[in-house]
Amino acid sequence: MKVICQTVLSAMALLVLVSNEERSVSAAAVSRAKREEKYTTRYDNFDVAGVLASKRLVRVYLNCLLETGPCTPEGRELKKYIPDAIATECIKCSPLQRKQAGIVLSHILLNYRDDFNKLSQKYDPEGKARKMYNIDQDGDDDYQDLEEA
């Protein structure tokens, strides 16, 4: 009887090890697949500089993202991807999309601080991205608000 119990326990231990190994492999495969998955490149030729040069167009996109106004097709697409891009540190972004996102966010941060704060509250309420990129919340550049959060 003792030999049978030891055999059963050994078999169960082996099953748990194999099961955990499969889970690790599956998690790694899913993680790799997510890294390989990319956002659409349909709007990669979008004139970001042209939009940022127009206060009216910037306002249209900000209103869309803040859900205080209608959205263009590009705005709807952008709004759909923002939460995932923040959560995954833009892992699905192409190099061009990362560059454009940086340009847009810098422009909004510098020229539309209140709207930037509203966007941050809406799409990153825990402030993970703000902390990761050392973005001062109140614009006084003392960064104390990062330490408090």
Image (cartoon, rainbow, N blue to C red):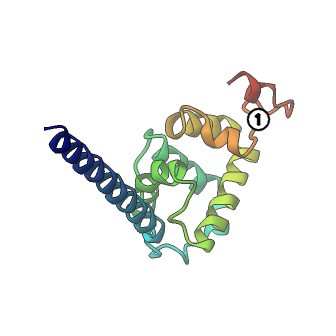
Element marked by disc 1: loop
Q: How far across and down, in percent of the image, does residue 11 sit? A: 23, 50
Q: Is residue 14 left or right of residue 50?
A: left
Q: Is residue 54 above or below residue 94?
A: above
- Residue appearing at x 47%, y 48% in the figure: 83
Where does label 1 land, which residue?
136
Front one among 64 and 106: 106
Q: How far across and down, in percent of the image, does residue 111 sit? A: 74, 46
- Say which quadrant the C terminus sits in: top right
Q: Quadrant of residue 48?
A: bottom right
- Residue appearing at x 51%, y 54% in the figure: 85
- Residue appearing at x 19%, y 44% in the figure: 3
Q: Quadrant of residue 146?
A: top right
Front one among 109 and 37: 37
Front one among 110 and 122: 122
Q: Is residue 6 left or right of residue 111?
A: left
Q: How far across and down, in percent of the image, does residue 136 sit? A: 76, 35
